[in-house]
Amino acid sequence: MTMRGRQTSSNPSESIKSLKARLAEHRQKLADYKANPDAFDNQGILRNAPSPEVRQRIINGRVKHLEDELRAFEKAIRDLGGEP
């Protein structure tokens, strides 16, 4: 099984363990981003947004992307018979 190009183990329990670790990392990444989006603006996208509305849309898009990734990890864990 692969997850975004990463090969997971043929042992479901090892795969679940790995996916749970990635899930925890992404949950933290989401929490950190929500707490301070500017800390992750290494390309100046937020800083150079033409308006507060555009800036908020960029932030909302990043949050949605991270939430989608969380759901994908949770689904992969469930598909292997685990609980996220």
Image (cartoon, rainbow, N blue to C red):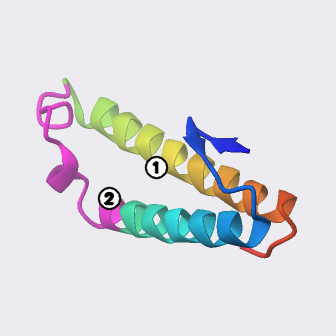
Position of 23 with respect to 46 (left or right) is right
Element type at mark 1: helix
Q: Residue flagged by tag 2: what amino acid is it?
A: Tyr
Please name whichever residue, 10 or 72, is drawn nearer the observer in this view of the structure: 10
Residue at x 12%, y 33% (from the top left corner)? 44
Q: Are marks 1 and 2 in contact (CB under 8 Å)?
A: yes
Which callout, 1 or 2, points at the residue further toward the start of the chain? 2
Query: For the C terminus, which image quadrant?
Result: bottom right
Residue 13 lies within the magenta run: no
Residue 33 lies within the magenta run: yes
> In this figure, what is the number of numbered marks?
2
**Residue 77, position in %: x, y?**
75, 63
Name the disc covering residue 63, or none: 1
Residue at x 22%, y 29% (from the top left corner)? 51
Residue at x 52%, y 70% (from the top left corner)? 21
- Above or below, comparing residue 13 to residue 64 in the picture: below
Name the disc covering residue 33, or none: 2
Element type at mark 2: helix
- Above or below, comparing residue 38 to residue 16 in the picture: above
- Above or below, comparing residue 68 to residue 21 in the picture: above
- Above or below, comparing residue 66 to residue 14 in the picture: above
Q: Residue flagged by tag 1: what amino acid is it?
A: Val
Q: Which residues are magenta?
A: 32-49
Please name whichever residue, 75 or 67, is drawn nearer the observer in this view of the structure: 75
**Residue 3, position in %: x, y?**
63, 44
Please name whichever residue, 42 or 10, is drawn nearer the observer in this view of the structure: 10
**Residue 27, position in %: x, y?**
48, 67
Residue 47 placement: quadrant = top left
Please name whichever residue, 22 or 31, is drawn nearer the observer in this view of the structure: 22
Query: For the N terminus, which image quadrant?
Result: top right
Disc 2: CA contacts within 10 A as few (<14), some (14-19) or many (>=20): some
